[in-house]
Amino acid sequence: MTTERSTEGRALDRVLEEAREVPAPDVDWARLESTLMQRVHAQQRARKSRAVLLMGGALALAAAVAIWFTRPAAPPAGPHAPEVVAQTAARDLSGPELSGTALEVGDRLLASGRELRVTHEGHSSYTLLAGSAARVVSLGERVVLSLERGATIDASVVPSARPETFVVEVANLRVAVHGTEFRVVWLGDQIAVDVREGVVAVGPRGELPSWRVTAGEGGMFAADGKTGQVSSRVTAEPPAAPPPSGLGVAPPKLPEAPSEQDVATLLDRAGVLVTGCFEEHVPVESGVRVSARTSLGLSIGADGRLGAAFDPPLAPAVEQCARRRVSALKGPVTKQGAEASRALLLGP
């Protein structure tokens, strides 16, 4: 059985026959492929550029946030802003005399073998006894010195209307004045202060003064500045020479023995001299300082001459130096003299 094709089928057949008769177009396939690849590469570059821009923006934002949170606080503006001061290297200075204008903050003043006198014209002058050392803490309208162990300083300060113009720091103790003459001696765990003129304020560092020492008084204070005692301290004067014979005037009466104050003063001065000898004759090796404990026995003759003994003994060079310097001191003339002793801590 034959099925007759539809009209649409016959039309389609005619179109196919006509298409076969038309020649195929000449297509440049290489050029077409090159054009397509260029478009593909251009799109890839565009996508990469957008990714880089997005990443760079994110990193820049993160860096900005980090700088904001980690930047140092800006210094306060105005007259109260802190000043930055360049400091030179500290120096060791010695000699019989120095001018205050030659000093710089941080300098170390050394009176190794002889006294060292420093003068701040119109302000103050002071003498470090042999074997003493001090550090310059402040200069200008207020001079501040920090004494090292075993140091003795005699100071004279021109009177001023300011609350304080001269300060001596010893361990944790602070001695402040604004016009006076005084002495400070560091004796191991204690510090002696003697005032010849004016008034001295004494107290722990960073606190209000706890004691006032006036002319003719002396005080003994703990190195931590927490305890102390002030008392009258009048140095005994040697007796006057007897009048010529035949005038019928009786010679002055000698005291039986040196007073407690005389003995304490002599022990103070002898202790400083011994400390100075120890620092001079015991070298520092590889940055290590040697320390020693001993008992100073002081004999005060009736004629005022002094002798020193040590238990346990010190190194020969130290002991010889100490005996020589102590014997140069002079005590009061009495009928029978005296003996006294004191424990000493030598070195750091």
Image (cartoon, rainbow, N blue to C red):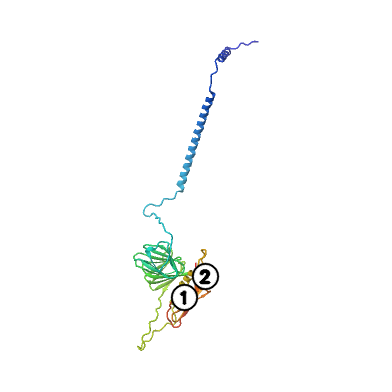
Q: Quadrant of residue 192?
A: bottom left
Q: Quadrant of residue 154?
A: bottom left
Amino acid residing under circle 2: Ala
**Residue 67 visible, this angle:** yes
| Nearer to the camera, 84 or 21 | 21
| Nearer to the camera, 344 or 92 | 92
Would you name the residue on which mark 1 appears?
Answer: 324
- Residue 146 in percent (x, y) is at 43, 65
Q: Earlier in the sequence, mark 1 or mark 2?
A: 2
Amino acid residing under circle 1: Arg
Would you name the residue on which mark 2 appears?
Answer: 292
Tag 2, which secondary structure? strand
Tell me what residue is drawn at x 49 percent, y 37 percent.
52
- Residue 5 in percent (x, y) is at 60, 12
> Which of the image's four quarters has the N terminus?
top right
Disc number lying in front (1 or 2): 1
- Residue 230 in percent (x, y) is at 42, 72
